[in-house]
Image (cartoon, helix red, strand yellow):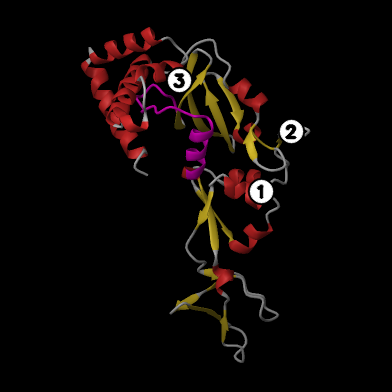
Amino acid sequence: MARPRKRTIEPLADSDTLRYLLQALNPENTCVMVSGEEVLSWPHKEALEALNLIESASPARNIDCYECEHQCLSRPVTIIHDCAWVICPHQDGIGRIKIPEKQLVQKQITLNKVVTWLKKVFDAKLLLDTGETGEGINLGVVLAGKYRLVLSLNYEGGNWVLCAGNNKIKLIDAIGFDGEQYQLLPSQCEVLLWADKSTEPREARRARLLATMNFRKAHKADFPGSITEQLAQEEGVSVSMIQNELTAARNSAVIQKLAREYLQKLQQENTH
């Protein structure tokens, strides 16, 4: 049996729906609403839904009415006992116009959903804002070879921009489509994550490691085996390096305090 052909990940087309949605978001407009009927018309609807970026929103409170020649825009909807209608202000003979339930369905994409998705696809490790992480939305720490880079999402010149160290690329340029699903473009991510030094603050790294160790000890059933070896493999360093970092963390009251904050954040993230 022949192997299935590997799909090529292409940059997002200018007309791509995901490109449009991401460009519609900005720091002042962190939620974009779309009608359920519009969602049904999207060419890659299943691929978008697979990202878990699109969620249900409250029913529409205003709709466009085309019942008569006036074709009123954004007429207020009245909903009583699951029955919805608009009132025609022009034709006395029309009065109430019943609105089908499906016409009121709305979906939304939020900036919070995008941030959550980016943390997942980059496998970003938790990083609390210690004042050293720079501007923008802190996504966490990503591993780039033997280095650890602080990854953030900034809004610059009307575009969302991914920043890691001194490297920057537009968010829409980092995402591609292979005909079936949206993925990160490997070539763009290689540029973004190239580094010759780590940018994660040392104290933050040690606190993160200590908090992760303590969290996994408390949830041993979910993390069988040596936690130290797990951390060493994930961080791309030796077991002795992890042990040294943990020792340094336990010997610092400042780092232990920061580790407790990390642990609280980890517990919150894992209860959602």
Q: Please state which amino acid type lies under the numbered disc 1.
A: Thr
- In magenta stretch: residue 72: no
Q: Is residue 32 above or below residue 130?
A: below
The residue sitting at 46% across, 31% down in the picture is: 139
Q: Report x, y in % for residue 101.
A: 55, 73
Q: Which residue is mark 1?
A: 17
Q: Which residue is mark 2?
A: 8
Question: Is 269 on the left-hand or right-hand side of 179?
Answer: left
Which of disc 3 and disc 2 is earlier in sequence? 2
Q: Please state which amino acid type lies under the numbered disc 3.
A: Glu
The number of numbered discs placed on residues in the rendered structure image is: 3
Stretch in magenta = 113-135
Q: Is residue 25 above or below residue 169?
A: below
Q: Report x, y in % for residue 27.
A: 49, 42
- In magenta stretch: residue 121: yes
Which type of secondary structure does the marked residue at label 1 adopt? helix
Q: Which residue is mark 3?
A: 234
The residue sitting at 44% across, 11% down in the picture is: 237
Q: Report x, y in % for residue 267.
A: 31, 36
Distance (Cα) linking label 3 and label 1: 35 Å
Distance (Cα) linking label 2 and label 1: 19 Å
Q: Which mark is residue 93?
A: none
The residue sitting at 62% across, 21% down in the picture is: 190
Question: Is 107 on the left-hand or right-hand side of 242?
Answer: right
